[in-house]
Image (tube, rainbow, N blue to C red):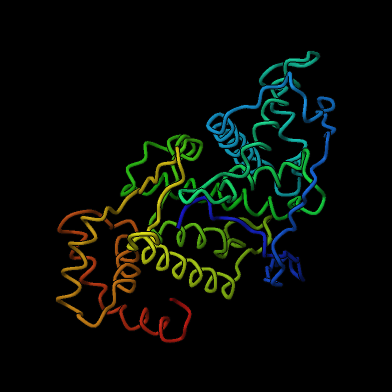
């Protein structure tokens, strides 16, 4: 499961009595795809007219780097903002950052923003290894969230993006703080996010981020609404484990069905490496031969999570101590909640 998959399209937020925030999944269909795009976009910097020959679109790498930088600044600002204060919409936040970079009262900020907007629009769809069109995992989502030059029926609602950027910020902090991933701080995560790498994270990193987001926080921060939601947290954990198990299974496919990166992109696996997992799998097979490979992977991800996790013999010992979790994992498979 890649970090780019963290998104919030299908969740709706409601605030009930006592400030309890809840989320539910209405099963909304994916956004419609418009065949005709707007010819212009009005921004706080001025009008951007698409189709001009004198505007050179940024390349995909520069666009991804800028998106990562904008996400990082937005998460920092939102985290430092008082809970009762209004948070700036992303559509107005983006052009304002170009003013911060290139100054007020000139045309440079508008020119640079136009090049960026052209680049995002042009590169939001890519060709995969099979030369099939697909969404660029970072730029298409950003394009929908930014709203500039985006058809109304493809625009991401503000509250959806607020949820996404909050969870992405938590994921960045969680990944940076997990010593087994060997990241040199949170800046290293954002640098990798903005590169041509397609990040692959262990399942437990996603689980920890979800637990941080939905844990009971009312007693710690009385001014914040109670964001605990055990039913949703449990469901998201199962969805995450199911996605990771499917990804692991698909990664083993060969021939025409093999998972291949899109041209110019490079998969970047953080944390557990294949050789390390093979050692764990051999030991688990000896201890519990009835486990399937996806079940071993799910157990392995659980075993290397937490403050005591490490590599080598200590991690092996931890896995063996958690073999008793096999029954719980197997029950999820039997119930159809994991593939």
User: In the image, is 203 to the left or to the right of 151?
Assistant: left
Please tell me whether residue 127 is drawn above or below residue 104 in the rendered image.
Answer: below
Q: At 61% from the left edge and 55% from the top edge, which residue is drawn?
A: 221
40 left or right, relative to 64: right
Query: What is the x, y in percent for residue 20?
Result: 70, 67
Query: Which one is nearer the viewer's eye here, 196 or 218?
Result: 196
Residue 114: name its quadrant. Answer: top right
Quarter of the picture holding the N terminus: bottom left
Is residue 106 placed above or below 165 in the rendered structure?
above
Q: Residue 38: where, in percent of width, then height?
A: 82, 40
Please name whichever residue, 86 or 193, is drawn nearer the observer in this view of the structure.
193
Q: What's the residue at 30%, 60% (across, down)? A: 304
Q: In the rendered image of this protein, does residue 131 appear above or below residue 51?
A: below
Residue 249 locus on image (x, y percent): 36, 67
Residue at coordinates 32% horizontally, 61% vertically from top-left? 254
Q: Nearer the viewer, residue 166 or 277?
A: 277
167 and 15: which one is in front? 167
Q: Position of residue 129 (x, y in %)?
A: 45, 48
* Quarter the C terminus occupies: bottom left
Asked which quadrant contains residue 55, the reply is: top right
């Amino acid at each position: 499961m890649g970090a780019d998959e963290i998104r919030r399209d299908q969740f709706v937020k409601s605030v009930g009595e006592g400030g309890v925030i809840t989320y539910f999944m209405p099963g909304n269909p994916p956004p419609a795809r418009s065949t005709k795009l707007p010819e212009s976009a009005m921004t706080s910097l001025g009008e951007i007219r698409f189709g001009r020959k004198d505007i050179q679109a940024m390349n995909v790498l520069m666009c991804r780097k800028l998106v990562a930088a904008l996400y990082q600044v937005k998460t920092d600002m939102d985290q430092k903002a008082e809970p009762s204060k209004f948070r700036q919409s992303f559509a107005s936040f983006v052009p304002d950052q170009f003013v911060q970079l290139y100054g007020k009262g000139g045309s440079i900020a508008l020119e640079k923003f136009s090049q960026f907007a052209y680049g995002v629009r042009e590169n939001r769809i890519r060709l995969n290894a099979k030369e099939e069109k697909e969404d660029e995992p970072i730029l298409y989502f950003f394009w929908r969230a930014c709203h500039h030059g985006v058809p109304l029926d493809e625009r991401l609602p503000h509250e959806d993006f607020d949820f996404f950027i909050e969870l992405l910020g938590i994921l960045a902090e969680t990944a940076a703080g997990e010593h087994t991933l060997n990241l040199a701080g949170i800046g290293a995560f954002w640098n990798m996010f903005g590169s041509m790498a397609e990040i692959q994270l262990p399942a437990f990193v996603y689980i920890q981020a979800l637990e941080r987001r939905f844990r009971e926080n009312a007693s710690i921060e009385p001014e914040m609404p109670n964001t605990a939601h055990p039913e949703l947290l449990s469901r998201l954990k199962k969805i995450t484990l199911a996605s990771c198990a499917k990804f692991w299974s698909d990664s083993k496919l060969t021939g025409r069905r093999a998972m291949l990166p899109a041209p110019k992109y490079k998969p970047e696996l953080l944390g557990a490496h294949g050789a390390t997992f093979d050692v764990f799998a051999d030991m688990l097979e000896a201890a519990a031969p009835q486990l399937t490979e996806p079940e071993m992977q799910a157990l392995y991800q659980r075993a290397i999570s937490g403050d005591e996790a490490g590599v080598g013999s200590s991690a092996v010992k931890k896995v063996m101590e958690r073999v008793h979790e096999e029954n719980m994992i197997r029950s999820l498979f039997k119930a159809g909640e994991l593939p």
